[in-house]
Amino acid sequence: MEIESIHLQAKLVQRSKQQSAVASAAYRSGSALTDARTGKAFDYTRRLAIEHTRILSPSYAPEWVSDRNTLWNTVEAVEKRKDAQVAREIEISIPAALPSAVREQLIWTFCENNFVALGMIADVCLHGPGHGDPRNYHAHVMLSTREIGPDGFGKKNRDWNANEHLETWKTNWERHCNAALEAAGIDIRVDRRSIEDRRKEKLAAARTATDWIARRQLEIEAERLNYIPRPHLPQKAYRAMVKGEVHPGYETEIEAWKQARISKDAAAARADEMQQILDAEIDALSQLGPELDGQEPGMLDTTEGTDNASEPMDATDLRLPDEDNETAEDLDRQTRDDFTPEAREVPDCLEEDPESFSTPQGGSSAEEAVSASETAQEALEVDKAIADACAARGEAERRLARAQQNLSNARDILEGKRDHLTGEILPKMPRRTFELPSPSEPDLYEPTDDDIEQSVYEAYAHDGDGDDRAPSILPLRTDYDESPQEQRMFERHLADWEAGETVRLNRAATNKRSIWESELPKQRQRLRKYGQMDLSQIVGKTLEAVRSIFGWMRDRVTAARGTLGSKHELTKEMQADWVDVLIENRQLHELVRQDEERDARRVNDEAGSVAKEGRRLWDEVEQKRGTGEAMSQKSQGSVTPHGPE
């Protein structure tokens, strides 16, 4: 069953940031509203991808709350302070797999049960994907911050600001979505937890699993979640990044966003490769005989008197501690322990596909079958070790990125770029008298990352060979009503989808075969030339070239499996060729493994050094905070506090 992340985020509409509830409501609903307080008109009727809007209110609320212009102008009029929090907005992602009618009913029911039931007015706007990611169905829910009664708005309810409410809403939304997906018979579920929490759960389950296939599958699922989550980017910085421009003040955040995207792709590639190896082991064991089917490869004893293979290396071995109280000594000790000769235990791995095994001519005995499988096993053992080293390096890079971000934040605080208590970026003082923006500057009221840019989506939509990675959205009969005309339309759309899928797969197979058959002989010839060299000379750029050749082949096979599927004839042919290359170039492959592990150690050491320096700077930050708090307490008697909003 596929698990998808879910998104529910709350934020405030604040006058202190020159925001207007009327302008926000106009933008999210795609309507034309006028702010009576400022006299400004906002017309967003040309906005696309706004599917449905509805204002939900308690039964005792006055009738005028159903009019969007009256509602939000009344909200603005009730608030007198110049720094008032005029409204709250909840941004909610909706599972794209649900039919349109189910999505609508799901969001209405959730808002009634969780917001209106508490006495809030909920202005709900359901948005579709537009020209961006076809999965980007979401809703914007604008909520009143004051209680509503028969005579209008009353006191501001500050209990609604409690974090407990937000956590409850997130939990309830996850429950509502999963119930709707189950009722619709869709084999997808959503999870509100963070990527890291879900990954830790998979690893913990893997450690206690008794079945070796289940354990390995859990490790693969954990590796797929082993990436850096994308940080939030303001809309202007996001658009500048998409255009290849630099938005002043957000250089660090943009670079972190790009690294997170690379990290996710790398995690998917590593997980795909681990899945390939697991599938190969299962297929190979099945081929060796029914008496061996179901046994873990590491438990096979094909040579009399040979001890059973050692347990596979845990994917968490190279991970530095995540606890906040880790010390530089912890990092140094972890780095040393992870790379001792005893720490790396390579698991037994078998051929990618049973058809790739070649039985010696003139015989088909069990001994000859085992010998053939052992040859492939030895080659893939090294490649599995390379994959483990790549995973270790990816984890070290992840820690390094986190340590660099912490170090950067500490420096910003010490240099006065961030507030030393809250950590928020301090705004630069304007050099001219502040003026309210004109209505011709709608970006001021646009939500951040409201629409996913098409160019960013396209980067995920294609594999490494440039072929379409995923099929187009399958038409569902439930999206059409029962009239004969609608059903004929569904049949036509389904036929178009099937024809399009056939074209997509044929085009991808033709392209991949062309690349593989034209480039593989060249790459093999290059490896043969390197194989004739003295191994002591294969260092530096030469070793990097060898590594890139193996990486190129691995990427091509991974792309074929991801786009065409593991059962496609071309995928099987490519896997067989790939293993032949590994067997032919064992020594070079071993050199690449050693180089990958050296890289992992290097990045690991760098992460430890950066974390150590970051901890030193954060000690200075804590001293600065302590000094600031002492000065604040000393001056409290002479300063009149400003009441909370």
Image (cartoon, rainbow, N blue to C red):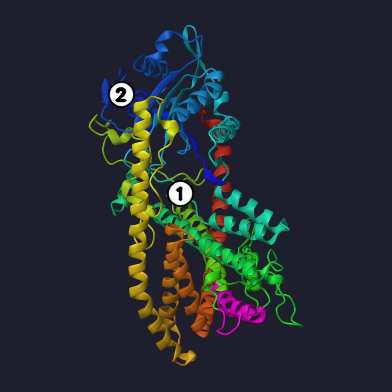
Circle number at residue 31: 2
**Residue furthest top as drawn:** 151
Q: Residue at x 55, y 36 (%)?
A: 185
- Figure disc tally: 2
Which quarter of the picture shows residue 22?
top left
Does dot 1 land on a helix, a strand or a loop?
A: loop
In the picture provided, is 597 more to the left or to the right than 481? right
The residue type indicated by label 1 comes to Pro
Picture coordinates of residue 186, whole percent (x, y): 53, 39
Q: Is residue 180 visible?
A: yes
Numbered range of the magenta stretch = 359-383
Q: Residue at x 37, y 50 (%)?
A: 501
Sequence-wise, which precedes: disc 2 or disc 1?
2
Picture coordinates of residue 543, whole percent (x, y): 44, 82
Q: Foreground: 22 or 629?
A: 22
Badge 2 crowding class, 10 Å Cα cut-off, few under 14, some 14 to 19, many 20 or more, is some
Majority SS type along the magenta span: helix
Q: Residue at x 65, y 76 (%)?
A: 340
Q: Foreground: 486 or 302?
A: 486
Q: Is residue 91 above or below residue 551?
A: above
**Do the residues bearing badges 2 and 1 touch, measured as CB atoms within 8 Å?**
no
Circle number at residue 572: none
